[in-house]
Image: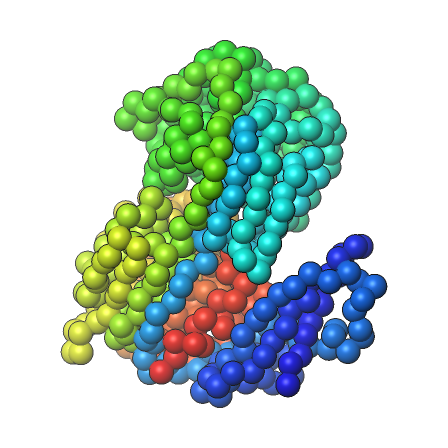
Amino acid sequence: MKTTRTVASKEFAFVTTFAPTTKRLSFQPRTYVLRKARVYTCSRRVTPVSQLQSRECTYLKVGDLETVTVPEIKNLTGTLVLPGSKSLSNRVLLLSALAKGTTLVENLLESEDVSHMLEALGLLGVKIEYQPSEKKARVEGCGGPFPASKGELFLGNAGTAMRPLTAALCIGNGDFTLDGVKRMRERPIADLVQGLQQLGAQVTCSETGCPPVHIKAKGLHGGKALVSGKMSSQFLSSLLMAAPYAKNDVVIEVQDELISVPYVLLTIELMRRFGVTVENENNRIFRIAGNQCYTSPGSYFVEGDASSASYFLAGGAISGGPVTVEGCGSDSIQGDIRFVHVLEKMGATVSWTPHSITVSRAKGKVLEGIDEDCVDIPDAAMTLAVVALFAEGHTCLRNIYSWRVKETDRLAAMSKELMKLGAAVMEGQDYIVIYPPGRVRKNITVSTYNDHRMAMSLSLAACGGCPITIEDPKCTWKTFPNYFEELARLIR
């Protein structure tokens, strides 16, 4: 029997069809329980609303449910093909839209954040052929500023859309407003706004230094901009991606510590693929020639998301594995790949190929707590906080102040939820120390704070033999809509 759920817009509806196969999911009213029963696989098509039948709108999908219960996982093992990287997907879409020529983007992530970018680019006049079932988008580049001269963009809680689009809209002409959900109005953007103002942009944000952002675009003059790098590397990345379209050369200088350096290097590498070179002096001063235009490389394949890989690889380390992820490996340009080296330091066994990673833990081998500077892997460090529950000795994760300005205050939220599971936690302004309990508590219900990484990280407690109930599972749609289905598929 096939059942479907429909999400309708004014003209089209996405119809998601679920067909039962032979493995492990079962359902209870308002609760989604991972069990050794069935797995439901998903296919999607686009259908005009007028052709839909009411019977196609009956299925209760994971995201409609209040909780997901993950049972005790004796072992997590198998192979997972990773979804495309969120950071790469949204950057590539933006550069493709600004470039000369048409770009075929392959393995594009299907998620809320990418949907916000696609919708925004469409509203700005960019022609995009999007095939979600094939994970492809064909983007006709504008060869410069977007065609639209005005617009109001709603970007949810997608920082990888809000920040880069703020900068990109300043290179053209027109009046624009960018806004998002309540939490987005609490996430800082003033450092980016000030950097753009120094380059001649007419752009403002709220008095709190957060969105909404208002732009009266008349182009970027260029020159020198000082920017802070201690809160988010996205401010620098956004300035870099817009800089080639300034009327004069641009110099960007980081005033203080630059966190998440690998994400900046990822941005620079993508710009190179689109024909623009950035002169980088010790990750402190960046020079970009003005009056340039990106050139489409023709096609771009988005590698698998290293942050998403962290959950499954950590599950392999906790439970024994082995778990293999395909789609990113030793050739990856993503900084979060360094997370795997930390697992190795804790006692996991790791093997690499250029495009895959396998993690396991030898029988009788105990994971060990670590003291780790996580300045370059703040997202993947969320996963380490849960791995720490099953390590011998305490774990200290340092230089993670950026957790405080993410989808929620992750330092406060993670501290609270780990204590529910029995850990003793010391929460500092930019660090967390986790003292694992003698026995992690079972059958605990944890809050997720509408934060996808809280949900996915905390689910790993089950890999240590502790059934756990996750509230608000739909928050994973932000970056990994079928996370729980993939987790269930690897349960042994």
State whether residue 206 is above or below residue 112.
above
Q: Residue at x 74, y 75 (%)?
A: 56
Horizontal and vertical percent for residue 211? 63, 37
Question: In the image as oriented, which residue stretches furthest toward the right?
Answer: 50
State whether residue 174 is above or below residue 188.
above
Question: In the image as oriented, which residue stretches furthest toward the bottom?
Answer: 37
Residue 464 appears left or right of 391: right
Residue 233 lies in quadrant = top left
Residue 201 lies in quadrant = top right
Residue 337 appears left or right of 248: left
Q: Nearer the viewer, residue 221 or 71?
A: 221
Q: Residue at x 40, y 54 (%)?
A: 304
Point out the image quarter for the N terminus.
Answer: bottom right
State whether residue 146 is above or below residue 467.
above
Q: Nearer the viewer, residue 183 or 270?
A: 270
Residue 5 visible to the viewer: yes
Horizontal and vertical percent for residue 403? 44, 49
Residue 253 visible to the viewer: no
Residue 332 appears left or right of 213: left
